Amino acid sequence: MAASNDGGDELGALTAENEIPVLPVQVITRPYMLQQIRGPGSPTVHNLELETMIVGRADDAEIRIGSTALSRRHMRLERYQGGYRALDLDSSNGVYLNEVRVFSAVLRDGDTLQLGNAVFLFHEGK
Amino acid sequence: MAFLVRFWGTRGSIPTPGRATYRYGGNTSCVEIRNGESLFICDGGTGLRELGVDLIKRSSAPISAHLLFSHMHWDHIQGFPFFAPAYRPQNRFCIYGTHPGDTRFHSLLSGQMRSAYFPVDFSELNAHVDATDLGPDGARDIEGVIVRCFEQKHPGLSYAYSLEKDGLKVVYATDNEIDLTLTDPTQPVREPNAPRLIPGKFIEFCRNADLLIADGQYTDAEYLKCTGWGHARATTVVDLAVQAGVRQVAIYHHDPMQSDRDVEAKIEVCRQRAARFGSPLFVFAAREGIELKVN
């Protein structure tokens, strides 16, 4: 609050004694994450920082799962409306969102994704 | 060829944005059903606005779609004035009546855009928005997809639609108080766990659907306070699906008072009921933003 010259008498001038201390604010940010809780390689956490990522057993998959229960390119994660959505890439064993087989889905915090024998928890960033 | 079914609005009665409905969504009824290049849109609730935005993003090619409305209550039409593709001259939309010469839905949609309700008149829509109908038997071949309608129990009436092609069947049946059509409507209170006898004609309409999207707005307790409002117990939808041999049922048109947790509790009760009947039926909650491949 700035002290005003012309209204100073009514408002009272700020002095070292009555000035309200401002604490430094620490902004904590957390990336979007895919936490693998079951299956080969678990437990582990993948930070989601790219626009699109492939999950599968292919060597060039951004999130590689060493299991024949997954297709080489099983699922794509892509940025969508500020968050992420998942798309089944015509995988053999499908993508299950909270037990529902989906072709695509906008993901929400706490969603479970199952791909073959790998199970993930999706965490929204902030 | 597979049907792709995407939920754009799953809430009943009124939009319910906010944290409590974040997972299942707050937009009102709207489902996109695609079969190859054919696009069907079931209802035009507030979810239709986002579908319109998405359709424009997908491609610059002209958009052609078949609009099937269950009825004209607000929560099924409010998105139409905000459906951006309807403002572009290269696009074409067909609005289907349920019997020959039936243009009610087209005229009621245009009525909600009169100046007293909305600043842009229906006549100012640049797209071709045509009134047509499903024909004398309430059934029509639309781009190789057989579409049928079925009159439902709802104040002012509503219609269910089935879409069939290549041996696959999707049924959209919302705003239907099937509990009032039961052979014995008092039975669910006397014997809540006993199978409820659904009218045979509706069972046949839903027979062997690969996906049934059905109004299951209420829990059993909620229904007792809302009887006659035009919506079903979710548990009765389970009985319908089991008796019709449905493969999977999406409980739809969630009550606006239900939080995400409430919806999940409702679905759990439905799953337990299906399991008690020894049925392989898969029950899940319709959720905004999910897309299913029905094949």
Image (cartoon, coloured by chain):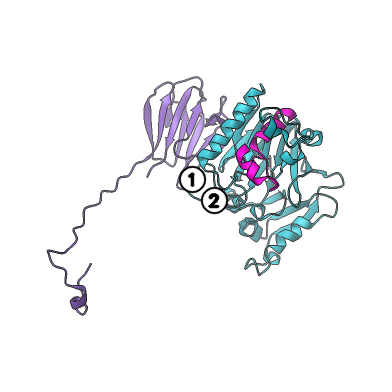
Chain colours: A purple, B cyan
Amino acid carrying label 2: it is Thr
Q: In x, y percent, where is residue A88?
A: 55, 33
> At numbered mark 2, what does the secondary structure look like: helix, strand or loop?
loop
Dot 2 falls on which chain? B
Quadrant in which residue B89 is drawn: bottom right
Tell whether A80 sits left or right of B219.
Answer: left
Q: Are marks 1 and 2 in contact (CB under 8 Å)?
A: yes
Where A64 sits versus B212, above or below? above
Which of B179/B248 is in front? B179
Where A122 sits versus B76, above or below? above
Q: Which residue is mark 2?
A: B16
Where A59 sits versus B16, above or below? above
Q: Which residue is mark 1?
A: B20
Q: In x, y percent, where is residue B82?
A: 61, 58
Mainly helix, strand or loop, the magenta region?
A: helix
Let me know if residue B154 appears in the view: yes
Crowding at dot 1, Cα within 10 Å, few <14 / some 14-19 / many 20+, comes out as some
Q: In x, y percent, where is residue B189?
A: 68, 34
Q: Residue at x 48, y 37 (%)?
A: A77
Let me know if residue A103 appears in the view: no
Dot 1 falls on which chain? B
Q: In x, y percent, where is residue B187?
A: 72, 33
* Residue furthest left in the image: A16
Q: Residue at x 53, y 39 (%)?
A: B262
